[in-house]
Image (cartoon, grey):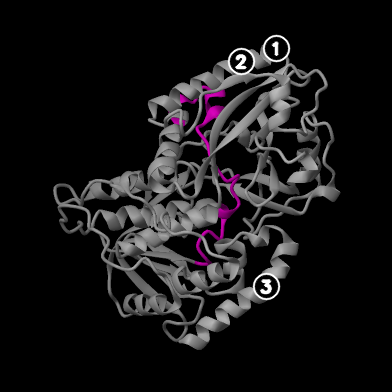
Amino acid sequence: MVSLRRRREARAPAAPDSLDAARRARELAALADGEAVDVLVVGGGIVGAWAALDAATRGLSVALVERGDLAQGTSRWSSKLAHGGLRYLAHGDVGVAWESARERAILMDVSAPHLIRPLPFLIPLGGPVGRAAGAKLHVGIHLGDALRAAAGTSRRRLPSARRVSAEEARRLAPGLSDRQLRGAILHWDAQVEDDARLVLAVARSAAAHGARILTYVSAERLRGDGATVRDVHGTAAADGAFELRARHVINATGVWAGELSGGAVRLRPSKGSHLLVPAAALGDPRAAVNAPLADDATRFVFAVPRPDGLVMIGITDEPFDGPIPDVPHVDAEEEAFLLSSIGRVLERTPTPADVVGRFAGLRPLLAGEATEDAATADLSRRHAVVEHDGVVTVVGGKLTTARRMAQDALDRIAARAGEDRPGACVTDRIRLAGADRPQGDLAAQLRFAVAHELALKPEDLLDRRTRLGLVPAWREQALEAAHEALAGAAQAT
């Protein structure tokens, strides 16, 4: 293996953070002509984007290839929470809970304060939650609060957990049922305003440090010294295929990682389904509501208010078998489960008629020693870095800990270089692109996305640069504006 060239310190931003079609074409042509990079990252989700930023800020030349758009896979179908790992404490996994709390602190206070905000959560006491279960939850939440303090998140950002009266609980969540309501546990966690935009912010930051961010480039075969890739947007070689040369390769393709690892990585995908309902249908809550499952008080279905006037109801955690689809769908059984589960603690159970949007994602959980019929809810959310045939694959984990996953993958590559290694990771100290830019109106956002955020298609604009596509009716209303933004950019060039 060729070692990395010595760089004594991380490189300061040396390029614009703007991404557009012209930059993509220029950088792709250079690679197609035989220019090599230090690190090739395959996968344009949250882990791949962080890996590109980590490598670039260590002073390495980087190319990231993604067969679709940025955040086209699992990273846009998350629960949109940067949570501190409360459920992991319930399973005794203190290590994952601590890592989650620390990474949440980095996201909130350093990386993306513009995309992460505090959110109160209520666990109603009484009815489905008896006194014994309530006491157990109370202990777990206070352990989580201790991890919050140890991770450096102040009480001003995430207030301490406390018991509240039934009256205060209903003020925060007017839709709560008052049947047998003895009060609630109020605790705080962090909400990601837009998971796809978080991926984009990381990718643009990587581009500002010189990384080449190449969407619609499919990696067809990985090797330790590069990959066979194909430009599926039609701007490179005649047939779109060429050999991309790299000294090191990172496979960060999530639930598709097993397909590119030659069987070296075993995954047990878990399907998480979500519903979107108007906030008014649940009494316009100001806090999220947790409803414990009937058969497991350590697992919850939650109703989380969003800044767009909707409430997200989620999440399922069921094994998924078969070919991995590009866009998973919520089936009728999952929808009924979510509605009935959250209805256990509400005055009025929402119905399918209340649902205005649905989405589902697949988590790339490590199979470990699990049997085929094992519940994916019981699998660890730990991540792993695996080497096979010279390729470094990083899998497992979750949105909150993606930065740390990327760091571990780059540390593995750095270790190969012996004394001639790059600098240490600095991504825990970097403020992401966009943190200081105010949002404009919709038309301005669409034009900005075409000019600076590598939006090449209407679906890029509606489904990932904005999240209008989460509600089909909103998507239809904005489709013409998306076409106009792309047409305007084409005329300008």
Question: Cα distance, mark 3 to mark 2?
Answer: 49 Å
Residue 243 % position (x, y):
37, 73
> Which residue is drawn at the image coordinates 66% and 16% (left, top)?
134
Residue 153 % position (x, y):
42, 32
User: Which amino acid type is shown beneath numbered disc 3?
Assistant: Leu
> Which residue is drawn at the image coordinates 47% and 36% (left, top)?
382
> How many numbered discs, if any?
3
Residue 54 % position (x, y):
32, 52
Q: Can you identify the residue that label 2 sits on?
A: 136
Mark 3, secondary structure of its residue = helix
For the residue pair 275 and 473, the one nearer the viewer reads as: 473
210 over 29 or under it: above or below: above
Q: Can you identify the residue that label 3 sits on?
A: 479
Examine the rendering and report whether any part of residue 490 can be seen: yes
Residues marked 1 and 2 touching at CB (< 8 Å): no
Question: Cα distance, mark 1 to mark 3?
Answer: 51 Å
Q: Can you identify the residue that label 1 sits on?
A: 131
Answer few, some or many: residues within 10 Å of disc 1's Cα (few below 14, many 20 plus, some between 14 and 19). few
Task: Check if residue 189 falls in the magenta segment.
Answer: no
User: Which amino acid type is shown beneath numbered disc 1?
Assistant: Arg
In the image, which residues are magenta?
67-96
